[in-house]
């Protein structure tokens, strides 16, 4: 990984640092998914994992893209949650307001840069006061599903 690359494990760790009171990890189990798909782009050394997360009132498009994978002759190598660089995206409001700008700054946002949110209220602190990249509960749960399906390699010290 180059210096600007971010792994799924490092995004998870920064989310843990941020999430002291938000309960993002506690609520991740309540998310259900439809159509978890993986698309392998062997010539580009790229694996795209997409799904539709079913929220309380809406559906959200979630995406984790692993890149810089090696081709083994039988297909792409299995991504590692700590060594493989990723880019992520979710269409939920939490991801947009909390992480999308900072994921873009850290080169871990999949897709185009979203319109930068301008705060309208100043009587409350901003959403992400540390300006760190991270994952919403939908992406946390998609990561766990990818581990359970043995699509990505589990590290011994990340969870």
Image (cartoon, helix red, strand yellow):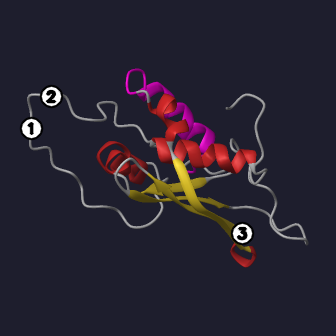
Please report the residue visible at 76 percent of the width from the left and 36 percent of the height from the top: 155
Give above or below for 140 relative to 79: above
Residue 8 drawn at (x, y percent): 60, 45
Can residue 97 be seen at all in this image of the molecule? yes
- Residue behind mark 3: 45
Please report the residue visible at 34 percent of the width from the left and 30 percent of the height from the top: 130
| Most common SS among magenta residues | helix
Disc 1 element: loop
- Residue behind mark 2: 124
Can residue 135 be seen at all in this image of the molecule? no
Residue situated in front as seen by the camera: 103 or 59: 59
The reply, left or right, for residue 15 in relation to residue 150 is left
Q: Residue furthest bottom?
A: 43
Q: Residue furthest right?
A: 73
Assess whether mark 2 and mark 1 are in contact (beta carbons under 8 angstroms). Answer: yes
- Residue behind mark 1: 121
The magenta span reads 5-22
Disc 3 element: loop
Spatial CA span between label 2 and label 3: 44 Å
The reply, left or right, for residue 18 in relation to residue 1 is left
Quadrant of the image occupied by residue 41: bottom right
Q: Is residue 21 magenta?
A: yes
Q: Is residue 30 magenta?
A: no
Give above or below for 148 relative to 47: above
Spatial CA span between label 1 and label 3: 44 Å
Callout 2 environment at 10 Å: few (<14), some (14 to 19), or many (20+)? few
Spatial CA span between label 1 and label 2: 7 Å
Quadrant of the image occupied by residue 75: bottom right
Of the image marks 1 and 3, the number of the one nearer the N terminus: 3
Callout 1 environment at 10 Å: few (<14), some (14 to 19), or many (20+)? few
């Amino acid at each position: 990984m180059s210096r600007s690359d971010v792994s799924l494990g490092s995004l998870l760790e920064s989310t843990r640092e941020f999430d002291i009171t938000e309960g993002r990890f506690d609520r991740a189990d309540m998310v259900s998914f439809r159509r978890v798909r993986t698309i392998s782009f062997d010539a580009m050394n790229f694996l795209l994992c997409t799904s539709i997360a079913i929220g309380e009132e809406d559906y959200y498009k979630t995406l984790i893209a692993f890149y810089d994978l090696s081709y083994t002759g039988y297909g792409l190598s299995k991504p590692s949650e700590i060594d493989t660089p990723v880019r992520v995206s979710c269409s939920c409001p939490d991801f947009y307001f909390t992480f999308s700008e900072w994921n873009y700054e850290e080169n871990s946002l999949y897709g185009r840069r979203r319109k930068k949110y301008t705060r309208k209220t100043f009587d409350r602190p901003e959403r992400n006061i540390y300006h760190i990249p991270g994952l919403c509960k939908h992406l946390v749960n998609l990561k766990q599903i990818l581990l359970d399906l043995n699509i990505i390699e589990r590290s011994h010290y990340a969870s």
